Image (tube, rainbow, N blue to C red):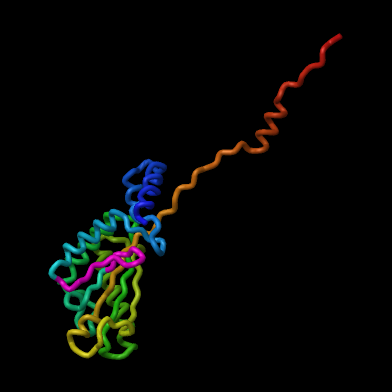
Amino acid sequence: GTGGGAAVGASIGAIAGDPALGAGIGAGVGAVGGYIWSNRMEEQKKKMEAATEGTKVSVTQTADNQLKLNVPSDISFDTGQSTIKPEMHPVLNSLAAGLKSNSNSQATIIGYTDDTGNDSINNPLSVNRAASTRAYLVSQGIASNRISIDGRGASEPVAANTSPENRAKNRRVEIFVKEPQQPQPQQRQQELPQHQEQQQYIQQPAIQPPMY
């Protein structure tokens, strides 16, 4: 759990000479899937909750310690469009600020559509929605290699496509932010090389026999 992780994190911080780093790592050591829920991730979650207050965006922590944002079409995309609505900009601005403050974090953006149209339209449209979201984050100073994208079309609805309201829920992007667990520093073992031992043996002064 996080209690044991804190102790491990303290040790890592001591080795690295950075107690704050150790505390951040320790908060999530032992996490599922190789991701940690550090103090920085918790802080970003709180800031995203504040930034999305009053909207229909949901901000959650997943079982494998990723920060998940579900952004429905109310503030994201119109039907058949991949252009981001202005209402989505404050959410993405806050997300970009969090990514800047935690340089170890990475993001995955997955686009979705409702069932209007067929797969030949919806599949590329969902990718384009994810790409538009990434492009906006890049415009805010986030390196593109920190953001991966995917599109699922209409294949994974969160509500039955039986009403305009439900279709709006399915026409969305999901953004996952994760902080990979950093490898623990290994203590170096210093051993005397064998050739040095042999050299030391050779250099031992020879014992002279007594003279009679």
User: Which image quarter: residue 38?
Assistant: bottom left
Give x and y (percent) for residue 55.
15, 71
Report whether 67 appears left or right of 17.
Answer: left
User: Which image quarter: residue 16?
Assistant: top left
Q: Is residue 56 above or below residue 194?
A: below
- Residue placed most toward the observer, 29 or 85: 29
Outermost residue toward the right in this view: 212
**Which residue is drawn at the image coordinates 33% and 68% (left, top)?**
108
Q: Is residue 86 above or below residue 188?
A: below
Figure quadrant of the N terminus: bottom left
**Which residue is drawn at the image coordinates 49% and 47% (left, top)?**
186
Outermost residue toward the left in this view: 54
203 within the magenta span: no
Give x and y (percent) for residue 64.
36, 65
**Which residue is drawn at the image coordinates 17% and 77% (left, top)?**
74
The stretch in magenta equals 55-68
User: Which image quarter: residue 152?
Assistant: bottom left
Give x and y (percent) for residue 53.
15, 66
Figure quadrant of the C terminus: top right
